Image: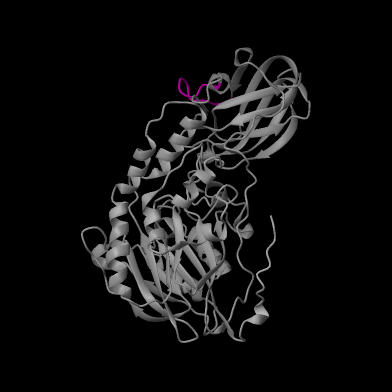
Amino acid sequence: MQSMDLGVTVTSLPEQHVGTPLRLMSWNLFVGGTINGQEKTGENLNQMIDYMNEVDPDVLFVIEGYGSGQKILDGLNAGRPAGQRFTGVQLTRPEDYSANGDNLWLYTKLEVEKVYPRYADADITSFNLGGARLGLPNGKHVHAFSTWTWHEISANWDVHEAVVQNLYGRPRTKTDEQLLDDDRYRRVAMGKAILEKALPSFIGDDDAPVLMGGDLNAWPYLDWTEQFAGARGHAGLVLPWPLTKMFADSGFVDTFRHANPDAGRHPGRTWSSQSGFRSAPGRIDYIFTRGEDVRVLGSRIDDRRLPRHQGSALDQAYPFYSDHSAVVTDVVIRGEGTGPDRPTVADEPEDAPGVWPAPPEGTPVPPAELTATATTFRPGVGDPARAVDGDAFTDYHSDVAPLPHYITVDLGRVRKLSAVRFQPTLAYDMNGTVERGVVQVSDDGTTFTDVAQVEWPRMSAPNDVDMKGASARYLRLRVNYGMGGASALAEIIPYELS
């Protein structure tokens, strides 16, 4: 990349006139940190609050507070000195509660100058939007809003299915236009109400910066342009998603994509660390900014528990504290102020070239020459033979049995192996997707030698293991952990050296 000298240095700016740094965080807490009520000890919520304190946002946009709002506020403020304490604002009013209770909250270290009144019309209520005017240390202010739009008829399933169908040359269930119609079911109407009616009623003609965080349940149009049709998990699709385009047309900046313009290297998956990221990168959670005085410095996606929270049974089942990733963005509001006072957040790039991983080196062993057995399987619907039948749309799936599980492939004769490709299930339900295990080989089917320990993501893309020329007749995968305590595979494809 060619470097460019713009002739601007920090020292060329007036002293004390860089601006006010703000760390913004947006997060759907999955029923108040209870993992949809499945985690009843309170430990996940405690760890969630610990993680929030680690991020240390200045403004925190919360979705699905659902009864945990006050405990979160108490946890954020525990041990904090005066001047660094949070104010918590419950934005969803009681008349708009769902069966789970309140939804939207806003937490901030800034002064809350005004909480905006409840807005409701035919399309949205305070369950979908709420906010406040926040005072800056230099006497200016910003407008901050938490938001949520409708979740049903989501593109999460449909795009995964379309990507898989494109990759494998199968007929499409939905056309591109039908995929875009997913947004038009309630979400576009909600977006119009937010952008054209609710926000103007709160802000009027005030040109102060607007900060907004939330879960739109809608995909980012910037990620699905022609430029990224060949990115991993896009499978040639070009999809101008209407809801997020409406936000851009209204002057809002998608801060994650602004800070990380390459959607191939920075897919920004926020759905879902719990149920699986599947084939297509689902980014449905956002931090938006609007205003000439807002400068985006950096943005990242967090989808893994802090190291001190890893290694437990809770971590094994739920790698993150919620089913949504968190979005963290650093900005500066131009004006009086010394500018950034801590390292800027940055997203880790993914090294995943190409629409789908290229096959490993070697010659695939024909399925007709392979047989498979397993220590546990679902008769009729999860037979191990399905893992070696050459059809990526049939799955081996374990029955309910204690881990570890073993699936063994008889190669028909001794072969010198270059690699093995393990294809996870291509179904939307990723139950059983293998996360940790050991690849082993044997000459007699009784005594096995370890070749590689594996740790794989909750994704649909194949996982390749370098066999380093190992000679064996039998190939075995010991599954130490799979999603939901099960094990499942679409295909095991051995490659042999010529």
Q: Is residue 40 above or below residue 433?
A: below
- 271 or 340: nearer the viewer: 340
111 displayed left or right of 343: left
Instruction: Tell me what residue is drawn at x 37 percent, y 50 percent.
Output: 242
Q: Name the quadrant containing residue 492.
A: top right
Q: Is residue 59 magenta?
A: no
Instruction: Tell me what residue is drawn at x 75 percent, y 32 percent.
Output: 451
Q: Name the quadrant containing residue 305.
A: bottom right
- 404 or 304: nearer the viewer: 304
Which corner quadrant holds the N terminus? bottom right
Q: Position of residue 177 (x, y in %)?
A: 35, 39
Q: Is residue 417 visible?
A: yes
Which corner quadrant holds the C terminus? top right
Instruction: Tell me what residue is drawn at x 63 percent, y 24 percent.
Output: 493
Q: Position of residue 300 (x, y in %)?
A: 56, 59
Q: Is residue 266 above or below residue 288?
A: above
Q: How many marks?
A: 0
Q: Is residue 99 visible?
A: no
Q: Position of residue 404 (x, y in %)?
A: 61, 34
Looking at the image, which residue sits at the far left? Answer: 122
- 467 or 342: nearer the viewer: 342
Q: Overall secondary structure of the magenta stretch? A: loop
Indicate the colouring scheme: one colour
Q: Is residue 172 above or below residue 338?
A: above
- Magenta range is 375-384
Q: Position of residue 194 (x, y in %)?
A: 31, 63
